[in-house]
Image (cartoon, coloured by chain):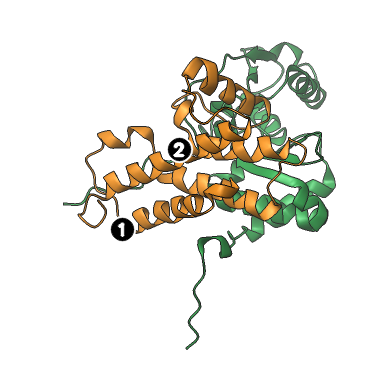
Chain colours: A green, B orange
Amino acid sequence: MPRKKLSNEDQPSKANCDLAETLVKELKRDNEWGQPTIYEQQYVTGKLSVIVIWDAWDHVPLEERTATILHAYEVAEDIEYRNRIALANGLTVPEAHAAGMLNYRIIPAVRAGDPVTEEQVRAVMCVQGASTLLDPNHPQLRFRSKEDAEACRRRLIERLPGSDAIWLIDRESQRADSFGLQEMAMTAEP
Amino acid sequence: MAIAGQRTGAIYLWGYAAEMLLKAAYFTFIGVPKLRSLTFPQDIQPAIARGRVLGIAWPAQGAGHNVRAWAELLVIVRAATPGGAFSARFGVQVQRCGQRISELWRETLRYHKNVAYEHEVDHVRGAVSWLLSHEQSL
């Protein structure tokens, strides 16, 4: 049988086909809200770093996330654009928050007598891209900038007329948690 | 160490070697003389701050030892420097090594008493070996 020796470098990380397909659609759609949120940062050299904040990365290894992003860009754009990407990172919302990237949060303060229900609030927050990874019953809407948070607040009010007083924007100081990496996979052996 | 069954210890040393190698590559690239001592406030902290400005997800906890982030800092600082960028494939490989090591390595690993699996040792060793064998290009 053929015996082929591959170096570490020669084994490309596999892209997650389902996520890559969805990401391609998102890259072409250029949606203003919802997940994933894609940040592109360009440097004077023309090179780019790309961060895709998306709860769908949960339980996907970091290198698979990177491969998926690069593959999606290659399909949505072209190989030349993909080769301009020096760094591609995929983070879930909780991971990005733990890394100090999403310090603005919209908090719903629903009180008795308000014209909207908690179910309506939860539903509209999820449409806007709230994360339910930490607690499915308490979606979290987090943003990188105050402008993004304010834009989302306006959309929330449009979708739920009369809810102006409910939506509070809170700025958190940077958290000191680690992120993303599950506890050591190592298992004690007898 | 791995052969002697001290596989967690082996991973700890491999990861530590990677951390030092990546830091050395970064500080060499930005022009710090090889024999100058590095300090946290003067060198490490500004490097972390620079990484965050450049868009690297760099959590505060254990920031100075975050191998993934150091690998990404090296890639992105080179990419942002005219004439300094790695090739696309090489850069991805450097990042991938950082990601692989960070899945299993922490600077606090030396306090663990559990024993890693052999495939976990291989996982880290493969990544660190690649970095060591390409040290001159980093």
Q: Which residue is mark 1?
A: B118
In space, the residues marked 1 and 2 are separated at their CA atoms by 21 Å
- Image coords of residue A185 (percent x, y): 36, 47
Image check: B67 left or right of B52? Answer: left
Q: Residue furthest bottom?
A: A1
- Image coords of residue A103 (percent x, y): 63, 20
Report helix, strand or loop for mark 1. Answer: helix
Identify the residue shown where x is 80% and y is 20%.
A154
Tag 2 or tag 1, which sits nearer the N-term?
A: 2
Asked whether B90 or B56 is in front, the reply is: B90
Asked whether A63 or B31 is in front, the reply is: B31
- Residue B13, quarter of picture: top left
Identify the residue shown where x is 53% and y is 48%.
B135
Image check: A139 left or right of A38? Answer: left
Q: Which residue is mark 2?
A: B19
Q: Chain of mark 2?
A: B
Q: Which label lies toward us, 1 or 2?
A: 2
Report helix, strand or loop for mark 2. Answer: helix
Q: Chain of mark 1?
A: B
Q: Is residue A87 visible?
A: yes
Identify the residue shown where x is 48% and y is 21%.
A176
Is residue B131 placed above or below B75 in the rendered structure? below
Q: Residues within 10 Å of mark 1 (few under 14, many from 20)?
A: few
Instruction: Kindly identify which numbered label has been placed on residue B31.
Output: none
- Image coords of residue A115 (percent x, y): 72, 17
Amino acid, disc 1: Glu
Asked whether disc 1 touches disc 2, contact meaning CB atoms under 8 Å apart, the reply is no
Asked whether A146 or A161 is in front, the reply is: A146
